[in-house]
């Protein structure tokens, strides 16, 4: 597992759009597989939030996001919306982070 703060090192030259889309596709399925009858563990939600937040710090992130189509952002929108649902009863800082992610990922 990649520690979220190390993402800037792993992707020090930037990230291709298909890699970003695959990351969110994987995050979506991770959240889906842990839903159903059992709630998503808090640490999974916090990890996903931290991961999505740290991805925004990768070089050329804004350029990558600008070039994505609406269809390519579908998994991103789903994951961030789901994080908002999972974290709504927790602390306000995490909800503010989710709101920022909606803006940074240009999902509004």
Image: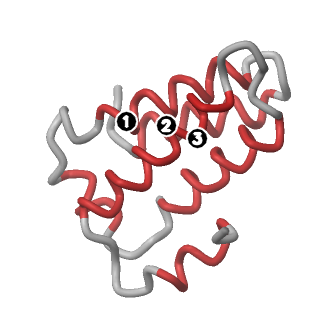
Residue at 37 percent of width and 36 percent of height: 75
- Quarter of the picture containing the N terminus is bottom right
In the rendered image, residue 29, in percent from the top left (x then y), is placed at: 50, 37
Quarter occupied by residue 2: bottom right
Residue 92 or 52: which is nearer the viewer? 52
Q: Is residue 34 above or below residue 68?
A: above
Labels 2 & 3 near each other (Cβ < 8 A):
yes
Q: Is residue 13 above or below residue 81?
A: below
Between disc 3 and disc 1, whose residue precedes?
3
Q: Which residue is mark 3?
A: 30
Residue 77 or 25: which is nearer the viewer? 25
Q: Which residue is mark 1?
A: 75
Between disc 1 and disc 2, whose residue precedes?
2
Q: Spatial distance from mark 1 to mark 2, Cα to Cα?
A: 6 Å
Q: Which residue is mark 2?
A: 28
Task: Give SS at disc 3.
Answer: helix
Residue at 70 percent of width and 22 percent of height: 86
Residue 105 or 2: which is nearer the viewer? 2
Disc assigned to residue 37: none
Does residue 99 appear left or right of residue 35 in this picture? left
Mark 2 surroundings: few (<14), some (14-19) or many (≥20) residues within 10 A? some
Mark 3 surroundings: few (<14), some (14-19) or many (≥20) residues within 10 A? some
């Amino acid at each position: 597992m990649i520690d979220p703060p190390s993402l800037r090192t792993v992707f020090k030259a930037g990230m291709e759009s298909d890699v970003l889309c695959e990351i969110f596709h994987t995050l979506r399925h991770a959240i889906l597989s842990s839903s159903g009858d059992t709630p998503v563990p808090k640490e999974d939600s916090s990890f996903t939030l931290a991961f999505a937040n740290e991805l925004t710090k990768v070089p050329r992130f804004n350029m990558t996001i600008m070039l994505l189509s609406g269809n390519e952002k579908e998994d991103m929108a789903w994951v961030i919306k789901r994080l908002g649902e999972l974290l709504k009863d927790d602390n306000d800082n995490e909800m503010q982070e989710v709101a920022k992610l909606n803006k940074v990922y240009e999902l509004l």
